[in-house]
Image (tube, rainbow, N blue to C red):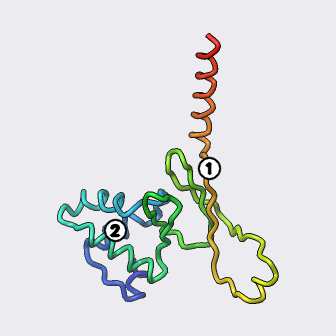
Amino acid sequence: MNKYRDIGFKLTPQRLAILDYLEGNQQHPSAEDIYRAVLKTFPTISFATVYTTLAALKQKGKLLELSTDPSKKRYDPDTSCHSHLFCVSCKRVFDMPGEHTPVLPESVKRDFSITRSHVEFHGLCAGCKKNKSETSKEVAHVHRS
């Protein structure tokens, strides 16, 4: 938690609970998910506290805000260079390690200095793909009967 104190981040008990929840969290929770989790420990915490804490962490570069899910923002405490996979069925977000920078035209490379990139892939995760395949087989079986 010293890494947050070193950037001038005031560590209140509520903020510590939020940071504790985020630490190592790979679920890419929404602000609502974080609020519900921290509410169990701090029943008086407000959603505004969660939201302002997330905004401050994002501004200080300690949290990524993801827009992979069009229905809500998600947050990732892993600020290392990586991309994301978004399942359009179950809405889960998965980390994909490594840098996946698209090939850029020479004119862009010459005229624009890229400092960071983020690539998102949207599709079906293995579980949803399997469920869809099984459902398709069941529907085909029913139609043949």
Determine the residue positioned at 50% across, 50% down: 91
Query: What amino acid does circle 1 point to?
Result: Gly
Percent across and percent down for residue 76 are: 49, 66
In the displayed structure, would residue 143 be above or below residue 40? above
| Dot placed on the residue nearer the N-terminal end, 1 or 2 | 2
Label 1 vs label 2: CA separation? Answer: 30 Å
In the displayed structure, would residue 62 be above or below residue 42? below
**Residue at which label 2 appears:** 18
Percent across and percent down for residue 30 are: 40, 61
Label 2 Cα neighbours within 10 Å, binned few <14 / some 14-19 / many ≥20: many
Residue 100 is marked as none
Q: Quadrant of the C terminus?
A: top right
Percent across and percent down for residue 66 are: 50, 66
Left/right of residue 25 with respect to residue 103 in the rendered view: left
In the displayed structure, would residue 100 be above or below residue 106? above
Residue 123 is marked as 1
Left/right of residue 100 with respect to residue 120 in the rendered view: right
In the displayed structure, would residue 89 be above or below residue 29? above
Q: Nearer the viewer, residue 10 or 60?
A: 60
Determine the residue positioned at 27% across, 71% down: 48
The outermost residue toward the front is 143
> Which dot, 1 or 2, sits closer to the camera?
1
Label 1 Cα neighbours within 10 Å, binned few <14 / some 14-19 / many ≥20: some
